[in-house]
Image: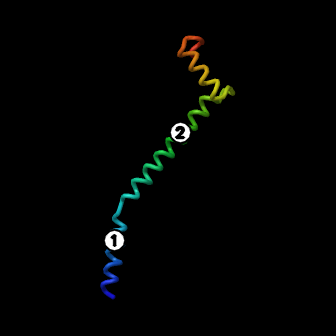
Amino acid sequence: MSNILQSVSQFTRSFLRDEEGAQVIEYALIIAVVSIALVVALKALTANGGGFGLFITNVTDCLQGKGPCA
């Protein structure tokens, strides 16, 4: 019985010291924050009522010299 308790105790200690799962959670949180920031930035860029398609058209026209760049 003592051997079983020792094994359980050793397994519990090693499980609590394992930090590999923490890295995965950290990366997931970073990806979530970046995704939210991108959504907020896109909403801010298209808040003038023109929509994202109009924004892309304006950028394309500006880069090709067909329209104003403002």
User: In the figure, is residue 51 to the left or right of 18?
Assistant: right
Question: Pointer 2 and pointer 1: residues touching (CB < 8 Å)?
Answer: no
Badge 2 element: helix
> Which residue carries the number 2 mark?
37
> Which residue carries the number 1 mark?
13
Q: Residue at x 58, y 33 (%)?
A: 42
The colouring scheme, among rainbow, by chain, secondary structure or one colour, is rainbow
The three-letter code of the residue at mark 1 reads Arg
Residue 7, percent from left and from top: 32, 78
Q: Is residue 28 above or below residue 50?
A: below
Badge 1 element: helix
Residue 47, percent from left and from top: 65, 30
Q: Residue at x 53, y 16 (%)?
A: 63
Q: Within 10 Å of the Cα at label 2, are there few (<14), some (14-19), or many (20+) other Cα atoms?
A: few
Q: Within 10 Å of the Cα at label 1, are there few (<14), some (14-19), or many (20+) other Cα atoms?
A: few
**Residue 41 got which mark?**
none
Dot 2 or dot 1, earlier in sequence:
1
Quarter of the N terminus within the rendering: bottom left
Residue 57, percent from left and from top: 61, 21
Q: On the image, which quarter does residue 50 sit in?
A: top right
